[in-house]
Image: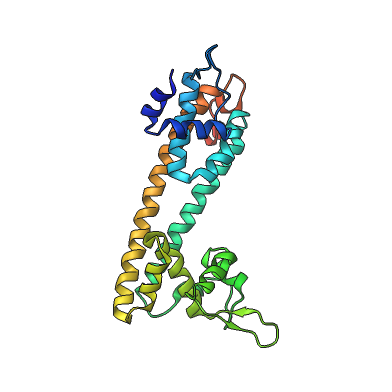
Amino acid sequence: MRGIDIARICDISTSTLKHYEEWGLVPEIPRTESGYRQYSDTHLSYFKSIVKLNIGYGMGLVKEIMPLIQQKEFLKALWIVNASQADLQKERIQAEQVITMLETEEVEWIDQMKHQNVTYTIGEVAEIAGVRTSGIRHWEKEQLIIPTRDSRSGYRLYTQAEIKRVMIIRTVSRAAGSLDIVREVLEGTDAENLRRTKELAVESLTYIDQSLIAGMKAIAELTLLIDSLAEPGDEWTAENLGSYAYFR
């Protein structure tokens, strides 16, 4: 099979195909005596999985799991994918929380949290909002949030209102695609701010749902690849797994 044939099937360029090969994402590709690559059906399955996984989860995850697939470390690869799916679910829950926050004056969402302080450290904010502290610092640098400083320690201190702002930034930035747009929304009039923020929060839910669909399609393609690579005796080929095996 020629590279151009695989590129057409996967709807990618031949140069992208070569990048995937150079990054070690597929098994070594043999060459003819004249130096041409000889792709097999297995290589095609790898490339199809890579393309779908990139759409569903990003190239970072692809680069992490494809070497594991080549080593037949299927479970390790699958747990990485599972963790990414779990993160997506958390992201959707947080987006729904933001929409709820925008529809009520009371911050009922924070009553569910274990921290009930007047002010919060950056670590506590990161835990509550589901973001990294580096992200919060970046938004502070962009002046999207302006915490106070403890007069003695110099540590950042955040109020509940600022936590709410952090959660809004986190959610709407996914749909907005630009911090400049997020800034415009946050700096608008109260009525316009609320309307536009709700719109972006709802858009982010749609984006998350689309990511779920793309992820499931990627898992289906990855399943086909593993099916073709697994051998008798591998845990992947075992029958009657899970609750069926337990309760039979």
Give the residue at x 58% y 81%.
Answer: 119
List the single residue furthest toward the bottom: 151
Q: Residue at x 55, y 23 (%)?
A: 229
Residue 200, position in %: x, y? 34, 64
Front residue of this view, candidates 174 and 97: 174
Quarter of the picture holding the N terminus: top left
Q: Quick check: 19 left or right of 10? A: right
**In this picture, is 55 found above or below 107?**
above
Q: Is residue 169 left or right of residue 237?
A: left
User: What x and y, as percent, mark residue 48?
Assistant: 44, 31
Q: Quadrant of the C terminus?
A: top right
Instruction: Say which residue appears at 64% left-offset and 85% top-offset.
Output: 150
Percent position (x, y) of residue 3? 44, 24
- Frontmost residue, 180 versus 102: 180
Q: How many marks?
A: 0
Q: Single out the residue that lies furthest toward the top.
A: 33
Q: Quadrant of residue 21?
A: top right
Residue placed farthest to the front in the image?
34
Task: Give left or right: position of 74 versus 17.
Answer: right
Query: Is residue 171 positioned above or below 41 on the image?
Result: below
Q: Is residue 96 above or below residue 81?
A: below
- Tell me, what colour scheme is on the image? rainbow
Nearer to the camera, 61 or 33: 33
